[in-house]
Amino acid sequence: MSENRVIANRYEITSMIDQGGMGDVYQALDRTTGQTVAVKALKPQVLEEDPALLERFRREAGALAKLNHPNIVRVLETVSEDERHYIIMEYVGGGSLAKLLRQTPQIPIPKALQLSLDLCDALTRTHRLNIIHRDLKPANVLLTEDGIPKLTDFGVARIGDAPTMMTQVGSILGTVSYLSPEVCEGGIYNEKSDIWAFGIMLYEMLTGRLPFKETSAVATIAAIMGDEIPDPHQFRSDLPPRLVELIARMLAKDPNARIASVRAVGAELDAILRGDKASEAAASPTVSTPPTPAASTPLTPSQSIPPVSLPPRPGDARRAARSTPKEPLIFLCYRREDTGEIAGRMHEHLIKAFGESAILRDVDRISDRTVSRLVLANDVVSHSDVMIIVIGRGWLGVKGKGRSIDNPKDPIRIQIEAALKRPEMSIIPVLVNGASMPTATDLPPSVQPILANEPLIVADNALDAHMKRLISRIKAGVGDGTAQRRIRALIALGVLIGLLVLLALLAQINSASSATPTAPPTAAPSEAGFDTTTNRLVFYPGGLPSDRTVLTLG
């Protein structure tokens, strides 16, 4: 959007503030009041690709309009003109919490507590109105110039119990690192999932790092679901035990074991801020404490507060198990509306055979707002050894109706195309519910190579027997793939050894040629003559001298 553009004959765009996946945010001048405002503009190209985003955009405006709170960004009005859609909001000029964390990775404890307490007030208000934010992260917390936090970006909020399309398909929204374990597993969003994300933010403000952040989205989700929460004392030794205990309660893997409400979190924060522990924190230097080595002695808890003991998780053991050939990483590719029920039962059998962390599925539940489905599908497949394609009678979908195999953006097609880029991956089509294998004319060219794989049949009335056969084929396929990789590795090693031998021979030949003795220069022939100076007959072995008069003989 160009500067100086005027919206609704009132709001003049002056500069861009930020760019997002769904919309861009601009700074603007309200010509009527003379105040600076923020304008969020929905991207036209995004709306063309997904018209449902307009509903999300309007829902954000409606949610913010209900939330009249000093720690929530205020909506002034919404505008639609020339097929463009805008939300006019109050301008918050102090940057975001994410920006503050980049400048000060470890926020001083009293300041972190006060920021969190203000955010608790905002979240308590939203939850009281039955609004779940679902995208809590530092980038969605703006700061006024005097440091007061304001919660924003309710674009993916769940309003009441209204079942939107996005809720029905179970889309995972929010940034991956802040997703709760139950949401990663396809569960519903509620107050407890907001509390988890809030706990991640508090952990990040205090330690300067995320507790779960791997090199890929899939690895991060696996860590959230299975790995132990790193003890915050490893990264900052001056944290009060009561605060560390609160973080552990906010980040309990089981939502039923998590602290009950944001209001309860606020009460704990207020007690810590006003109590003796807050006095200890206030006495510490105002500059952020540098990270301390993991081996350093943590802060000793008082007798009244038991030491924090995070429950052991099987994450590390399960990760180690994945590295063995007997524990392949399996991706279950299926269309929920076609084969969701039987795929769920197949999933249970696969977990029994290979372990829960060895099975991946439901990539399409992660929204483009979190990470590109194409990027994520490639990420998932790149970590997988086997893809099981569950094909039912409705697997092809309805042509031209979005979720169908002829649509390049169809999640199933994206996943299969990613798998076909890896020749070593074992791909197993599984026919269920009386389905037959599609023909080449049914499939786009990019998916047709799956027809070269022999399908298996899995039926409900013989599920146990059929799953045993499928599991045996998975193990055999992974074994074959491992053997093929070993053969290719041996061939490559042989070629490398051959090259090294050849280079060694060439070096030896060059060395031998350089060591061959050089023939000495040819000596001048010996000659005899009569030296007129000495009147004597003289024999000259190196030839006649030039400084004497010599009569040669012969």
Image (cartoon, grey):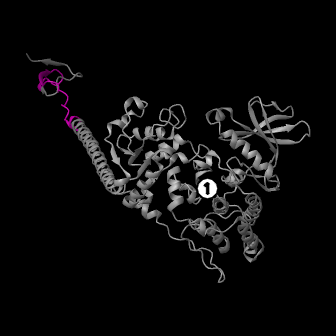
The correct choice, above or below, for 36 with respect to 323 in the image is: above
Q: Which residues are magenta?
A: 511-538
Q: Is residue 371 visible?
A: yes
Q: Choose between 503 and 493: the one closer to the eye.
A: 493
Q: Residue furthest right?
A: 33
Q: Quadrant of the N terminus?
A: top right
Asked if residue 126 lies in the magenta stretch, the reply is: no
Q: Name the quadrant containing residue 15.
A: top right
Q: Is residue 98 visible?
A: no
The correct choice, above or below, for 367 with respect to 320 in the image is: above
Asked if residue 516 lies in the magenta stretch, the reply is: yes
Q: Choose between 2 and 84: the one closer to the eye.
A: 84
Image coordinates of residue 8 in percent, x first then y, are 84, 33
Image coordinates of residue 230 in percent, x first then y, are 56, 65
Q: Quadrant of the C terminus?
A: top left
- Left or right: 523, with 99 as reference point: left
Q: Name the quadrant containing residue 16.
A: top right
- Left or right: 105, with 383 as reference point: right
Residue bearing the label numbered 1: 178
- Left or right: 71, with 295 as reference point: right
Secondary element under disc 1, as helix, strand or loop, is helix
Q: Choose between 424 and 181: the one closer to the eye.
A: 181
Image coordinates of residue 342 in percent, x first then y, are 43, 51
The residue at 77%/49% (across/down) is 64
